[in-house]
Image (cartoon, grey):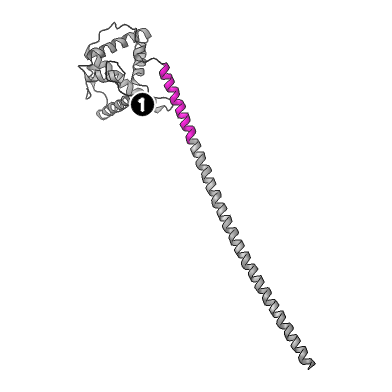
Amino acid sequence: REAEERLTAELVSAKTALDDERLAHEETAREKDALKEENAALEAENAAQKAENEALKADKTALKEENAALKAEVKRLKEELRRLREALERPNLFERLADTPSPVTIELSTLRVIISKIFCDKIAADIADDADESEDRQNLSEFTYDWALFRFGIKEVAEKHLSSILKAVAEHRNVSGRVSLFGSLVGHPDCPLLPEEGIHFFMQIWAGVHRVTGGPSSSECAEGVTLLP
């Protein structure tokens, strides 16, 4: 009987040990599952943090690009303002010649040749300005003044010839489309006013015509006559 009781006690003890071990395994399994869940949560959090960092990096890059664009725009506006101030401070062609006499009478045929020469030289000057990024195209009024200075050399002589040219424009504007157009392009008060964009557009069209036809015809210099009026 003692042996049976001892065996029973051993069996009960063994069963208790097995139950304890099973419970320990279950607890370990639960802890592993909890660790897995915690690790998955940490990985998700890390992924979210990484995505947030990437978004912040992209925003920072976008802000840098926007800042660079704003700086470029500010620089452009400052340059535009500088040009506008210079234009306002610089008298136009007619203000410069307001008190200049017109000693020369210019006939229509001669005036057409002069205008053709100015147009052709303006095309060449535009090509040179476009090749130099630091230079802006002159409007035709400014170019015409500089053209006369270069051609005649002496300011007083150049301004007298310019005054005669503008007087001839006023006289012949109603009988010649080219003369009227030239007057508009240089801002002659007796001719319809055109914006500066219109001046550049006309010069591009005329340059294109000369490019297609192989350059100005001989009659352009002799008579001021070409495909254009």
Horizontal side, residue 63 vs residue 153: left or right: right
Q: Which residue lies furthest to the left in this view?
A: 175
As shown in the figure, which amino acid type bears the numbered disc 1?
Ile
Q: Residue 17, relative to residue 44: is it above or below?
A: below
Asked if residue 88 lies in the magenta stretch, the reply is yes
Pointer 1: what residue? 127
The stretch in magenta equals 69-90
Q: Nearer the viewer, residue 29 or 62?
A: 29
Quarter that holds the C terminus? top left
Q: Nearer the viewer, residue 75 or 10?
A: 10
Quarter that holds the N terminus? bottom right
How many labels were placed on the picture?
1
Q: Position of residue 204 (x, y in %)?
A: 31, 28
Q: Residue 85, relative to residue 44: is it above or below?
A: above
Asked if residue 48 lies in the magenta stretch, the reply is no
- Residue visible at 55% across and 50% down in the picture: 52
